[in-house]
Image (spheres, grey):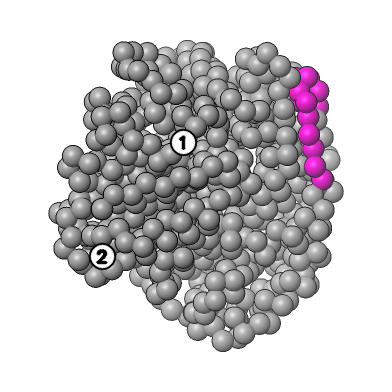
């Protein structure tokens, strides 16, 4: 796991070398163990190394193939590289034992496309072909590893983090369509970034860039090279198009057996390391299953890590501790304090580089910093919800639409207003009553948030797709958070390639998350939080074999219309007793509602009364202030909307922009 950077130019002069050196300095946190550079007359590569496999100098990068044809700067892990060595490269005289060398020689002995079909891993890399003078940029199937690129003057530059562009370009402009998308989703969907003419490479894709592109000395930005014959992007993996054949011949037990076999194999692969390794354990299904399998294949005590909160509605550390005790792990738990919160918020813009307001970013950062004190690699449960139908919104959004789709608009509006006018604490009182006297298990959590989402849906939905999107959106259409109307048709964009209707909703809705929410939110959150401290994270659920199996399963194997991940729940019972597997999903969540009214209140007031709001032409600051007033008084729980705006304001402040 590392950081990469590179530049393709008509002439690699001192200015280009300075860019590479600055990129190495800017991304040092991702690869603190060593660094290296390579240059010829057309291309220069930089590399920061986090040594995980082959800790010797034989693993140093950039690396040149034995034939001299290819040069690579690589970030990630190829989990099946030893198998590939034996199967395809048995006679090779190896310099070392790194997976980078395996990847490079496999490309040299076959070709890039065939290699991408053979390798199993997480990765982003730049590859230079000396023979044809072409640059390739490649990103893994699910987008675990980041890769940014952009054109500036007569050069094309790329790297692992967006901050490297700030070192090279002094004319960065904000992309207002990206700001609009961010306000809706709390993240910026690929391929755009917060900046014009700088893009993310989509997951499962590679770009081929001919050196002729820069020889032509185009001075325009990315839009100009999009249609150029010397710049081509090709998708080598698309889970959306290839995995919708339901297999009715296999029973639930058949599928469970296959998933168990594949997941165990995936965990074993992710455990290969030459440095200490651990696992994030939230106490939920996903991480508990990973930890249980890991324990069975480890000759030593496994290391488990969690964080705790003094808010009982968000704290899962007690269950995590019980699970760790049952597994016999070496368990590490850290309580999050007010100081931890305040220490993190002002660092978010430098950690994430662009506005990003999934509030679980804060515990992810704190947990990563804590974990790095003990290990250098940690396994996570990322991807399970998207692949195995785990999000509650899949279930209750469809259920809600069935109940309300025929209601007249004025009746939906009336119900919505009733929901909005019930204060958050009253919803919580009602939740506690239901949990104490009526519900026996799978107790309700965060009822106020869920009810307000239902109110949003009733107000803004005319079909099942709009109904579902209302559960995803932070700001609803009628709230007019922006003073500008940007016609970016977010629904159409996110659901391109996915035909979602009432008949196929259950089968297709999770594909939206695999396409956008997983790579642009979940994996961004984990990668930036962990790599900020030089901690590598690995996600066993992100296996193309598991995705294929999941997409072949009948929907009733995934959900009983009350809860999801049925097959993982049943599989977990083979490892843990029932008393440790039942309970509501919390994950590494935080009580942001409480924090905004307590430890972060002064910070919030400072930003909402600053020139960034008062002189802002893009954001409707009157609406923001009204929401903050209502939130402080406890009339509504607006913490997601407010956090969304606050993170944007903080980013603008730290980067020196105004909009």
Residue contact at pointers 1 and 2, CB within 8 angstroms: no
Q: Which residue is mark 2?
A: 154
Could you tell me which secondary element the residue under label 2 belongs to?
loop
CA gap between label 1 and label 2 equals 29 Å
Magenta segment: does it hold 420?
no
Residue bearing the label numbered 1: 60
Residue 323 colored in magenta in the image: yes
The residue tagged with tag 1: helix, strand or loop? loop
Residue in the image at 24% along x and 70% along y: 219
Q: Quadrant of residue 635?
A: bottom right
Instruction: Please tell me whether mark 1 or mark 2 is closer to you in this view.
Output: 1
Q: Is residue 40 above or below residue 570?
A: below
- From this viewpoint, is residue 410 visible? yes
Total labels: the figure holds 2
Q: Is residue 256 visible?
A: no
Does 612 appear above or below 45? below
Q: Position of residue 319 (x, y in %)?
A: 78, 32
Residue at left offset 40%, top offset 41% = 62
Question: On the image, which quarter does residue 121 sit in?
Answer: top left
Question: Looking at the image, which residue is at 44% across and 27% down?
Answer: 99
Q: Check disc 1: other Cα within 10 Å, few if <14, some if 14-19, many if 20+.
A: many
Q: Which stretch did the figure color magenta?
A: 322-335
Residue 541 appears at what percent x and percent y? 52, 30
Q: Residue at x 52, y 49 (%)?
A: 524
């Amino acid at each position: 796991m590392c950081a990469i950077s590179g530049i393709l130019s008509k002439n690699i002069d001192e200015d280009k070398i300075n860019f590479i050196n600055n990129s190495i300095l800017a991304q040092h946190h991702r690869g603190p163990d060593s660094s290296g550079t390579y240059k010829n007359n057309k291309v220069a590569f930089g590399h920061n190394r986090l040594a995980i496999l082959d800790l010797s100098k034989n693993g140093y990068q950039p690396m040149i193939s034995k034939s001299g044809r290819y040069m690579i700067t690589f970030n990630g892990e190829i989990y099946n590289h030893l198998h590939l060595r034996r199967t395809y490269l048995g006679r090779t005289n190896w310099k070392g034992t790194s997976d980078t060398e395996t990847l490079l020689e496999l490309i040299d002995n076959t070709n890039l496309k065939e290699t991408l079909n053979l390798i199993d891993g997480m990765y982003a890399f730049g590859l230079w072909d000396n023979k044809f003078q072409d640059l390739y940029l490649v990103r893994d199937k699910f987008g675990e590893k980041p890769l940014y690129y952009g054109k500036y003057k007569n050069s094309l530059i790329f790297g692992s983090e967006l901050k490297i562009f700030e070192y090279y370009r002094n004319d960065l402009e904000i992309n207002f369509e990206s700001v609009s998308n961010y306000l809706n989703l709390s993240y910026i969907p690929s391929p755009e970034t917060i900046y014009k003419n700088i893009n993310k490479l989509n997951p499962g894709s590679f770009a081929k860039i001919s050196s002729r592109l820069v020889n032509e000395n185009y001075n325009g930005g990315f839009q100009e090279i999009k249609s150029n014959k010397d710049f081509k992007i090709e998708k080598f993996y698309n889970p959306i198009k290839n995995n919708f054949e339901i297999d009715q011949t296999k029973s639930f037990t058949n599928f469970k057996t296959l998933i168990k076999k594949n997941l165990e194999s995936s965990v074993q692969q992710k455990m290969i390391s030459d440095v200490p390794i651990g696992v994030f354990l939230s106490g939920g299904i996903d991480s508990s299953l990973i930890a249980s399998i890991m324990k069975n294949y480890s000759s030593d005590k496994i290391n488990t890590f969690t964080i705790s909160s003094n808010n009982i509605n968000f704290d899962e550390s007690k269950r995590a501790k019980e699970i760790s005790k049952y597994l016999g792990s070496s368990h590490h738990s850290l309580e999050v304090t007010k100081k931890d919160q305040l220490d993190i918020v002002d660092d978010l813009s430098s950690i994430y580089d662009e506005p990003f307001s999934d509030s679980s970013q804060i515990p992810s950062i704190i947990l990563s910093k804590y974990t790095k004190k003990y290990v250098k690699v940690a396994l996570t449960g990322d991807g399970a919800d998207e692949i195995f139908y785990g999000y509650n919104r899949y279930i209750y959004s469809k259920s809600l639409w069935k109940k309300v789709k025929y209601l007249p608009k004025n009746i939906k509006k009336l119900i919505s207003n009733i929901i909005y006018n019930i204060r958050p604490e009253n919803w919580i009182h009602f939740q506690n009553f239901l949990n104490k006297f009526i519900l026996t298990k799978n107790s309700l959590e965060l009822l106020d948030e869920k009810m307000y989402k239902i109110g949003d849906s009733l107000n803004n939905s005319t079909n099942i797709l709009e109904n579902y999107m209302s559960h995803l959106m932070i700001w609803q259409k009628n709230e007019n958070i922006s003073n500008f109307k940007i016609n970016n048709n977010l629904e159409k964009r996110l659901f391109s390639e996915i035909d979602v209707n009432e008949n196929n909703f259950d089968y297709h809705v999770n594909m939206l998350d695999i396409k956008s929410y997983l790579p642009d939110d979940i994996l961004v959150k984990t990668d930036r939080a962990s790599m900020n401290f030089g901690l590598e994270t690995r996600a066993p659920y992100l296996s193309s074999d598991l995705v294929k199996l999941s997409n072949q399963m009948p929907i009733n194997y995934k959900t009983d219309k009350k809860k999801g991940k049925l097959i993982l729940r049943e599989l977990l019972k083979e490892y843990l007793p029932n008393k440790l597997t039942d309970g509501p999903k919390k994950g590494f969540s935080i009580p942001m509602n409480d924090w905004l009214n307590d430890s972060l209140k002064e910070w919030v007031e400072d930003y909402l009364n600053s020139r960034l709001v008062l002189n802002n032409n893009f954001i409707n600051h009157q609406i923001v202030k009204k929401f903050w007033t209502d939130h402080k008084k406890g009339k509504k729980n607006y913490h997601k909307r407010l956090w969304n705006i606050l993170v944007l304001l903080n980013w603008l402040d730290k980067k020196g922009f105004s909009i």
